[in-house]
Image (cartoon, rainbow, N blue to C red):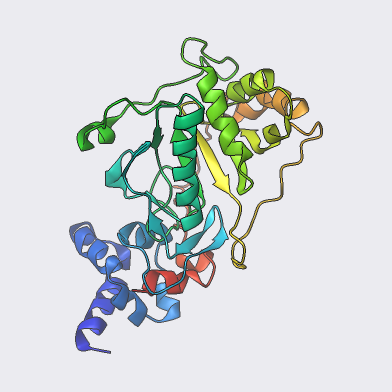
Amino acid sequence: MTAGVIRRALLVIALLAGPAGLVVAQEQSLKDTQALAAMSDKQLMKLPAKKVFSAQDTPTRSLRARSIGSYARGCMAGGVALPVDGPAWQVIRLSRNRYWGQPQLVELIEKLALESKQQDGWNGLLVGDISQPRGGPMPSGHASHQVGLDVDIWLRPMPDRKLSKQELENVKPTLVVKDRKRIDPDVWTEAHARLIKRAASYPDVARIFVHPPIKAELCKWAKGDRSWLAKVRPYYGHNYHFHIRMRCPAGDKACKNQPEPSPKDGTGCGEELAYWLGNAPWKRIEQPPPAKKPDKPVKPPPPLTLASLPAECRAVVTAE
């Protein structure tokens, strides 16, 4: 180990407290995989996971592609970038550097974009967050998207022209619902329904998250084989995009799948949807209990550290 690597490792350790004047130096140190590799396990595991993973701006080159851990607590080795400007898609908000995923997910996005344009009357996909270059917790915006198997697809078709980088950075969402119970018929089209159905029909897709009125509209629209609807799950915050989640790739033994969706009626259009269209799921959001003034100052919870992630994630953040 060279003296320079040791110095960089010591700098990372010294900066854990994060003095305001040394933030930039801290971020640079966290990017240095050699410095991270030089640290002891005890030292490394104390680092805030979201800072370490968000500081990594390149994927691992020396590790084979695999997903490690769960969708909301894991990391990714061997991630690949979705080309930011494809024949039927564009990646938005490039500055986030969240267009990395497992090769299987990147292939699925490209397939969905091309097929939906050729067969479903959809002009092309605007692709939102996938994962960071090495997965892991993001500094903001998502609890999941950590293993390279999640992607947000906007419910706004790509325009007929290629958007500039500035336009992609500032693109505005288009809500397809009026509220948590009603679709907006002036925005929602059958092309939206065909796009989501196509994504749900892929065998490797485990779940698709949408706002409850979107699920209700799909339940009304679907004819014939309706089994694909079981994968479409109502959930908060998906009123301008839908979230595709893939199953763990075959052979990724460290990757943890969720249980298969199993609604009572086989589609989720019955009791499950009624629950989400009711008031119960929304009470904590719309009617939060009044905050009690604490007797003593309350310390914020400590940040999630690398120790909270699977042990294999140590190799991911230290690999070249």
- Specify whether residue 102 is in view: no
The answer to whether residue 87 of the structure is visible from this angle is yes
Q: Quadrant of the C terminus?
A: bottom left
Q: Quadrant of residue 248?
A: bottom right
In which quadrant of the rendered view does residue 286 lie?
top right
Answer left or right for 59 relative to 275.
left
Is residue 183 positioned above or below 55 on the image? above
Residue 177 location in percent, x, y? 51, 18
Which residue is at a point 54% across and 19% down the rendered structure image? Answer: 190
Residue 17: percent from the left, percent from the top?
Answer: 31, 64
State the residue at coordinates (32%, 25%): 159
Q: How many numbered badges does the structure rendering display?
A: 0
Left or right placement of residue 13 versus residue 244 in this view: left
Residue 259 rendering spot, x and y as whole percentages: 71, 50
Whether residue 313 sits left or right of residue 171 in the image: it is: right
Closer to the camera, 143 or 149? 149
Residue 231: where, in percent of width, then height? 66, 38
Q: Residue at x 72, y 23 (%)?
A: 274
Name the quadrant of the N terminus.
bottom left
280 relative to 97, above or below = above
